[in-house]
Amino acid sequence: MTQARKYGDLVDQLEVGPLTIVVRHSCVRRDLYEILSKQPVSPALKERLLGRGTVRGSDALYVVEVPGVHQITVATAAGRIVVMPRIETERPAQRAAVLALAELIIATKSD
Amino acid sequence: MAIDESSIVDAVAGLGIAGNEEGLIPAFGLYLTKHSADYYNRISFATARELEGSGLEDDAEQLLVEAGHVCAFNTFGGIMQSAEWEAVVKPMIETREDWIRGMVGVVNAFGWGKWKIESLTANSELTISIDEAYECSGWVRDYPLGARARCYLATGGVAGLMNLLYVGDITDRPKLDESYYRELFRAEGHFTATETKCRARGDAGCVITARRA
């Protein structure tokens, strides 16, 4: 019998270009994602995310609320981006949204 | 750089942390539950009051403080590993004790009462005073003063802080699982806390001290 995953268990680790995406089990309906960059996050990312939802916080630390999709927390200098999916989205859609965000992070690195 | 609590409070306030349509508060890498302080108070106090006169009063207290240990382990531990912590608090940290000072700043930003470090001896003792602690505020409003302290969750939280820093090593980003919990809270010489003053007993404020068991 397969042991059920617990909160925080590592589900997957992906390399997307220069980024590492760590996927952890949250509950039966969703995973938690952390995108790690060795470099600080570009200030351009915040500008690009403005059109996707409500942005709160400072340039050093901000939260983007994308309605019905997920909440993104960006620690700019540390290069850490945490994505907490909304429960109404299915796991494949959660992952697709995070991968799209990763592509955006990569695209804004040169901005 | 010393821990600047006001900058922590400002940064957390700027994030506009609030509950969402799921009844949760996604923050600091955690899904905190959105409910009123009285919801938890009513449940814990009903448990304690149900057992009054049964001879199990101390057991009830220990169970409710244990809930505080678990909360401290997961919530404080999770916060100390979060992106928010890394962005706001970690740049100010110079010593291991600063992790406790930083966490007290986050607690105050969340509004779980007004915590103040009265004394902190590394690896030995921590005394926290709390003004307007939400647990005893609820008790004082709804129930008569008595001989017992009632800030169960905060008491477990203060012990938890010391166990995270001096029994375990939260600075090394350990996996916060059940095995690690037992390592921290069941180990020989782990920290336990006592609430020596509490508004629920008629004291002016609440004071909690954690020492090694």
Image: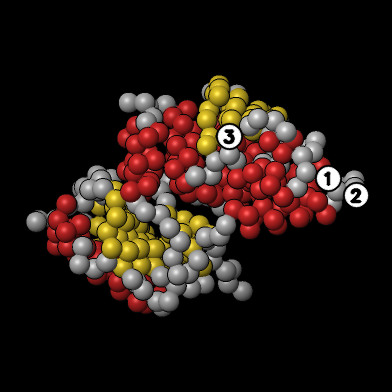
In the image, what residue type sits under mark 2?
Ser
The residue lying toward the viewer, choosing from B116 and B91, is B116
Q: Which residue is drawn at 32% across and 26% down?
A: B1
Between discs 3 and 1, the one toward the N terminus: 1
Along the horizontal axis of the image, is B82 left or right of B148?
left
Could you say whether the residue bearing mark 1 is in a helix, strand or loop? helix
- The residue to which callout 2 is attached is B54
Numbered-mark total: 3
Label 1 neighbourhood size at 10 Å, few (<14), some (14-19), many (20+)?
some
Q: Where is residue A96 in the image (x, y as percent from the top left)?
A: 30, 74
Chain where mark 3 sits: B
Mark 2 and mark 1, same subunit? yes
Residue B116 location (% of width, % of height): 52, 30
Which circle's residue, 3 or 2, is located before the other in the chain?
Answer: 2
Q: What residue type is labelled 1?
A: Glu
Label 3 sits on what residue type? Ile
Q: Do the residues labelled 2 and 1 touch (CB within 8 Å)?
A: yes
Q: Distance between the residues labelled 2 and 1?
A: 7 Å
B23 and B199: which is toward the camera: B199
Q: Is residue B125 left or right of residue B44?
A: left
Q: Does residue B207 appear left or right of residue A70 in this picture?
A: right
Reading the image, the residue beneath label 1 is: B57
Crowd rating for badge 2 (residues with CA inside 10 Å; few <14, some 14–19, many 20+): few
Residue, x 74% and y 35% (percent of image)? B201
> x, y (%) of residue A5?
54, 66
Marks 3 and 2, Cα distance to the nearest angstrom? 30 Å
Question: SS at mark 2?
Answer: loop
Residue underneath mark 3: B130
Q: Are marks 3 and 2 on the same chain?
A: yes
